[in-house]
Image (cartoon, helix red, strand yellow):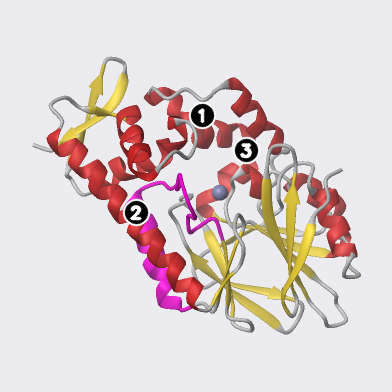
Amino acid sequence: MNEATTMNIAPGILRIDLSSSVARVATYALLDDAPSRDVLLVDAGFRGGADQIDAALRTVGRALADVRAVFITHAHADHSGGLADVIAAAPGATVIASAGDRAWVEDPERHMSDNYDWPATYGLPVPEAVLAALRSMLGPGVPVRRIVKEESEISVGASWQLRVVGVPGHTRGHVALRDPRSGALLVGDAIADGVPPSYYESSVYRATLDHIRALEPRMLLGCHYSPRLGPAVAAMLDEATKQVDEAHAIIRDLVAIAQEPVTLPQAAKALQARFGDGGETRRWAWAARGHLDALMRAADAEPARVGNVPAWRQAR
Ligand SMILES: [Zn+2]
């Protein structure tokens, strides 16, 4: 079994870094120090990771059975795939998610087709081995018992309240948790770090970056990078904003000057050429479509087709 590493972030906030042969992701455990000893788990990790979470909790005198609620920041396989395992060990725990990501939490097959397999329709097939790895991270669907939105309150024990912040973009229903006690924002994957960034509808993602900046968090607790503190918070937001603005200009110009409608592989290649590798071209599909959809929403582009695949052209 892989072993989790843990880090005490602030009083009552434990970061648990999980790893497997296919994924690495951090979850967070919020620990009530009152007699209730309640644990709020922020994200459930991937399928098969629950034993690592349990072992990590035992280093601070708790266990998975103490989990009273699981807050899902967003439904990606490495954040929600372990939910069924967690609930098996903590059967009374309340599963909390947003309306936007609920269907993916509850229905892994729909999650696979909506989120992971769609680029195939656009000319960027996803290799079977990649789909198999993603599928291996997803456990059975679990019913969401509580739906939250902006400003919903989440309690840990009797005296610790956190607020939900809507941070859509990376997924359509992505939510974060704001902790007034530490000034931390448990931000999931709402802010991209490095390449390729991954978001639906780039203008929604960009607005989320502005929203987070306005909250002035003292600390950003993401799931795929180390905690950002103090000046590093603004630096990360500024870098992500610069990246999404530049990417938008690239796609806007590509559509504007193209003689023929632009396909998703062409748009993905244009981003890859500017921002460096980030692996195979298909990994840029999410960002590329995010910008093309933003152009459509702004009525700067319209749908077209090239052969059998959807494409985009300058609006006339
Ligand atoms: Zn994600």
Residues under labels 1 and 3: Cα distance? 15 Å
- Taking the magenta stretch, the answer to whether it contains residue 214 is yes
Of callouts 2 and 1, the N-terminal one: 1
Where does residue 256 sit, x and y in percent of width and height? Answer: 14, 38
Task: Locate residue 130: give its quadrant.
Answer: top right
Q: Is residue 177 visible?
A: yes
- Secondary-structure class at tag 2: helix
Of callouts 3 and 2, the N-terminal one: 3
- Secondary-structure class at tag 3: loop
Callout 3 environment at 10 Å: few (<14), some (14 to 19), or many (20+)?
some
Q: Which residues are magenta?
A: 188-216
Q: Nearer the viewer, residue 174 or 20?
A: 20
Instruction: Give the labeled residue for mark 1.
Output: 117
Q: Amino acid at mark 2?
A: Val
Q: Amino acid at mark 3?
A: Asp
Where does residue 109 sit, x and y in percent of width and height? Answer: 61, 31
Q: In the rendered view of the protein, which quadrant contains the N terminus?
A: top right
Residue in the image at 44% along x and 29% along y? 119
Q: Nearer the viewer, residue 111 or 77?
A: 77
Instruction: Give the labeled residue for mark 3.
Output: 107
Q: How many marks?
A: 3
Q: Is residue 149 left or right of residue 223?
A: left
Q: Are marks 3 and 2 in contact (CB under 8 Å)?
A: no
Callout 2 environment at 10 Å: few (<14), some (14 to 19), or many (20+)?
many
Callout 1 environment at 10 Å: few (<14), some (14 to 19), or many (20+)?
some
Task: Locate residue 254: give its quadrant.
Answer: top left
User: Which mark is drawn over residue 244?
Assistant: 2
